[in-house]
Image: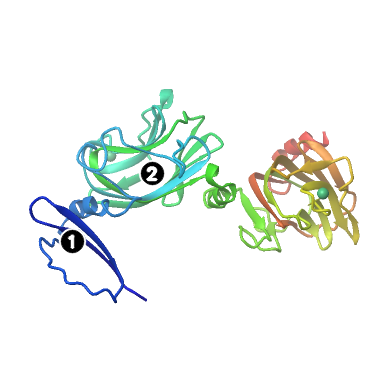
């Protein structure tokens, strides 16, 4: 394998030359002058300032936001097409705080006056994970539980997720703040009174690809499941995912599970989604004739009904979104789509609850599970929404 040489040469007389050289076979006679070496051990701030010259996905902010990469108004990021990030996007990266002074704060701004803040309002070198938005302002959580000591520097992983008009902020994989109904205009990073390297910045916008976005989203939201084509590229294998109660027991009777389903892609080869209750006992959203239109069917004891020609059809040729609910009450299984009962098993085989899909991409979100044995009041309340 050839080596890569990256040479930046600065010449005398104000002329700057840059050379990029590939390959070990390259024969060169080069007179080196003004060679400088910048090592992190010589000073993190000097090193970080140099680093941003070479790495695109990096931002170095010094003190007042005026000495580093950006001004005090911060830097606004866009999707790959240059469109403002407004809704349904994820931006993540790493932070290195190297110095901070009076009232230091770093902000992730999703709209005018609407910011997540890593903020040291009492200037003791310890940052709180707060936010500021309209009348819900000035929650800097300096006295709260999410504190980050930066007196000797600080490194953390961060992510801002804006999904369906709610903004979430994660630090080291943990949700630390959320803003409901935020002002969503653009995504901007800025800082005052601190030195901070923001690096490894990655942007994932739904506008650039729904499946990539949903796959990333499942890293942050527990109550989601992403299934892609053969059940092998997403969250789960072709054998599907089995849900349990909070104690890990199989779901067999007296539970309600529901959520939202986005069908984002369908192959033209027998695509189907299944809710499975036991061996050979399944409700099926099924496109058996491979025309992109799904019937609401089932498979039970070898009896198969795909109802492709039936009245209840879901056209997913250009994607589809629907609300689903499975109710298993006193040994009877019910399937609802958008609040309407579409299938019923009077005496199903009840061994477990499993979801899976083949030949389609499906994103399940906002999954809610109610188990009678865990909370009978909550179960009965949600049951009454379906069975009256
Ligand atoms: Ca503080
Ligand atoms: Ca069909």
Quarter placement of the C terminus: top right
Check disc 2: other Cα within 10 Å, few if <14, some if 14-19, many if 20+.
some
Earlier sequence position, callout 1 versus callout 2: 1
Q: Is residue 201 visible?
A: yes
Residue at position x 29%, y 75% in the image: 24
SS under mark 1: helix
User: Toward the viewer: 169 or 351?
Assistant: 169
Q: Quadrant of ligand 1?
A: top left
Q: Is residue 234 left or right of residue 4?
A: right
Q: Where 113 sits versus 292, above or below?
A: above
Residue 108 position in % (x across, y down): 38, 38
Q: Where 359 sits versus 140, above or below?
A: below
Q: Is residue 106 visible?
A: no
Circles 1, 2 touching at the beta carbon (< 8 Å): no
Residue 347 position in % (x across, y down): 89, 53
Check disc 1: other Cα within 10 Å, few if <14, some if 14-19, many if 20+.
few
Residue with the most extreme left position:
13
Residue 211 position in % (x across, y down): 59, 50
Quadrant of residue 146 within the rendered picture: top left
Residue with the most extreme right position:
303
Residue 195 position in % (x across, y down): 23, 44
User: Toward the viewer: 28 or 332?
Assistant: 28
Q: In this view, does 40 lie to the left or right of 299?
A: left
Residue at position x 70%, y 63% in the image: 238
Q: Where 32 sits versus 218, above or below?
A: below
Quadrant of residue 38 within the rendered picture: bottom left
Residue assigned mark 2: 146
Residue assigned mark 1: 41
Q: Which of marks 1 and 2 is in front?
A: 1
Residue at position x 15%, y 59% in the image: 42
């Amino acid at each position: 394998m050839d080596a890569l040489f990256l040479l930046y040469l600065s010449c005398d007389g104000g002329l700057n030359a840059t050379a990029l050289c590939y390959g070990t076979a390259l024969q060169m006679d080069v007179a080196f002058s003004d060679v400088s070496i910048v090592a992190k051990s010589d000073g993190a701030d000097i090193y970080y300032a140099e680093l941003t010259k070479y790495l695109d996905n990096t931002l170095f902010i010094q003190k007042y936001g005026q000495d580093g990469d950006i001004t005090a108004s911060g830097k606004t990021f866009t999707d790959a097409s240059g469109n403002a990030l407004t809704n349904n996007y994820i931006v993540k990266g790493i932070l290195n705080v190297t110095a901070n002074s009076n009232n230091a704060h770093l902000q992730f701004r999703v709209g005018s006056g609407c910011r997540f803040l890593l903020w040291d309002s009492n200037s003791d070198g310890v940052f709180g994970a707060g936010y500021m938005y309209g009348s819900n302002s000035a929650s800097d959580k300096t006295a709260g539980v999410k504190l980050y000591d930066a007196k000797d520097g600080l490194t953390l992983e961060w992510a801002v997720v804006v999904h369906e008009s709610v903004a979430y902020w994660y630090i080291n994989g943990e949700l630390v703040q959320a803003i409901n109904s935020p002002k969503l205009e653009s995504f901007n990073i800025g800082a005052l009174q601190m030195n901070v390297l923001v690096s490894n910045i990655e942007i994932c916008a739904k506008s650039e690809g729904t499946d990539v976005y949903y796959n990333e989203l499942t890293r942050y939201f527990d109550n989601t499941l992403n299934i892609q084509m053969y059940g092998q590229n997403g969250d789960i294998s072709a054998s599907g995912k089995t849900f349990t109660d909070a104690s890990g027991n199989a779901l067999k009777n007296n539970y309600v599970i529901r959520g939202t389903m986005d069908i984002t892609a369908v192959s033209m080869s027998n695509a189907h989604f299944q809710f499975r209750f036991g061996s050979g006992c399944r409700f099926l959203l099924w496109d058996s004739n491979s025309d992109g239109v799904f019937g609401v069917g089932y498979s039970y004891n070898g009896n198969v009904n795909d109802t492709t020609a039936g009245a209840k059809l879901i056209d997913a040729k250009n994607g589809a979104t629907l609300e689903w609910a499975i109710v298993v009450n006193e040994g009877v299984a019910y399937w609802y789509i958008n609040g309407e009962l579409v299938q019923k098993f009077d005496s199903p085989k009840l061994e477990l609850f499993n979801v899976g899909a083949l030949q389609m991409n499906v994103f399940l979100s906002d999954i809610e599970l109610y188990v009678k044995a865990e909370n009978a009041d909550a179960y009965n309340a949600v049951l009454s929404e379906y069975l009256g």
